[in-house]
Image (cartoon, helix red, strand yellow):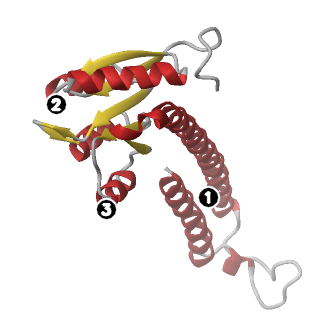
Amino acid sequence: MDLHSKNSTPRLNTLILEDDADDRFLLERALRRSGVDFAPTWVDCRGDFVRALQAGRPDVILADCNLPDIDGAGALEIARRMHPDAPVVMVTGGLTDEKAAELLAAGAHDYVLKDRLARLGSAVVAAIERAGAQARQLAGAERMKAALAATVNAIMRTLEKRDRTRPATSSAWPGSRSRSRAAWASPTASSTGCAWVRACTTWARSTSRARS
């Protein structure tokens, strides 16, 4: 996706949580110098941040880590809860390695130090592309889950129909001298098949949750 061309894509709806006027100027200048075409929505407190997120999903979120009424972790938690697929880049004056690791583990796509704003544009582009890749992966997992669920349901219907229509007793099952048809149609055999189907369903659900 080309985020630098004004003709090929709409302007990026960029929500920016920052309360310092000088830093706002520097952030906007860094983005414009990088060539990213963006439409900023500036907020400077927790309440305005929440209201902006309630108004709709931004294309990308830039959040300072040190505001009077909210820190980076709090802003990230709110953003992830309200728009879990929106990419978040933390922008801060200083961050320890431990705190940076915590924010990335909590769902931030990247962080940029305010004395290294030259990489802000590339960080924004990479975050948006990564979020898009994650969304496509999740959609693929959901399609696989739906296909597997349809297969499982078809198998269960077949098993149930077989149990309803198969005679309870007969002579030896074709090809077997030791098992009667009653043994093959027994509740034990049926429950074993259903248990296998349920196991497949559980696996599909756990796989989908792991990928998301």
100 vs 61: above or below:
below
Q: Is residue 94 visible?
A: yes
Residue at the image position 39 percent from the left and 48 percent from the top: 107
Q: Is residue 86 left or right of residue 158?
A: left
Question: Mark 2 vs mark 1: which is more N-terminal?
Answer: 2
Q: Secondary structure at mark 1?
A: helix
The Cα–Cα distance between marks 2 and 1, rounded to whole angstroms, is 56 Å
Q: Is residue 82 visible?
A: no
In contact (CB < 8 Å): disc 2 and disc 1: no
Q: Provide residue 115's location: percent of width, then percent of height.
A: 36, 39
Question: From the viewer's perspective, is the residue at label 3 or at label 1 nearer?
Answer: 3
Q: Are there few (<14), some (14-19), or many (20+) residues within 10 Å of tag 3?
A: few
Q: Is residue 21 left or right of residue 189?
A: left
Residue at the image position 19 percent from the left and 26 percent from the top: 19
In contact (CB < 8 Å): disc 2 and disc 3: no
The Cα–Cα distance between marks 3 and 1, rounded to whole angstroms, is 56 Å
Q: Secondary structure at mark 2?
A: helix
* Amino acid type indicated by mark 3: Glu
Residue that label 2 marks:
46
Residue that label 1 marks:
160
| 169 and 140: which is toward the camera | 140
Q: Secondary structure at mark 3?
A: helix
Q: Provide residue 205's location: percent of width, then percent of height.
A: 51, 56
* Amino acid type indicated by mark 2: Arg
The Cα–Cα distance between marks 2 and 3, rounded to whole angstroms, is 24 Å
Q: Provide residue 28's location: percent of width, then percent of height.
A: 38, 20
